[in-house]
Image (cartoon, rainbow, N blue to C red):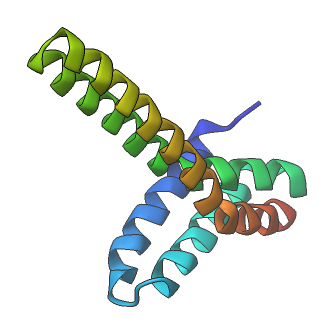
Amino acid sequence: MTDWRAVLSGFAVIVVLGLLGAVVPGIGQLIAGLVGGFVAGYLAGGGLGRGLWHGLLAGAFGGLLVGIALFLLFTVVGVALGPMEGVLGGLLGAGALAVALAVALLAAVDSAIGGAIGGLVG
């Protein structure tokens, strides 16, 4: 079962360290993902697989939120413009959501690695 407290704690660490690490693009986000994933895996405990899962969720959580927000934005703007634009906005929103989901999972790989290490330690 997923420990959402661990996932949200890891996500919070990723956000804080990501903002602080914005001074060093790339490296700052990589370290933020590793440390946040480690925190999620450590808090979840239970070994390699459980830590990896929780780290992956912590790392992907932000990307998922952005994807959902883009989907809603495109759909609402499309509906506000008219019925045909609503369909087009919905399609654009669904495409943005699919891309955001794929990017979120790819970007969460470093968090999953950190989570696996945290799961082994915790």
Above/below status of 61 relative to 55 = above
- Image quadrant assignment for residue 112: bottom right
Query: For residue 81, what is the image quadrant?
Result: top left
Judge by depth and name the residue closer to the eye, 5 or 55: 55
Q: Is residue 49 visible?
A: yes
Residue 30 horizontal side relative to residue 18, left or right: right
Q: Quadrant of the C terminus?
A: bottom right
| Position of residue 36 measured from the top left corner of the image (x, y, whole percent) | 57, 65
Q: In the rendered image of this protein, does residue 64 appear above or below residue 93?
A: below
In depth, the one of 107 and 8 nearer the eye is 107
Between 114 and 5, the residue placed more toward the observer is 114
Q: Position of residue 70 (x, y in %)?
A: 32, 38
Q: Is residue 13 left or right of residue 110?
A: left
- Specify the farthest residue to the bottom: 24
Q: Residue at x 70, y 49 (%)?
A: 54
Q: Which residue sits at x=88%, y=58%?
A: 48
Residue projecting furthest to the front:
84
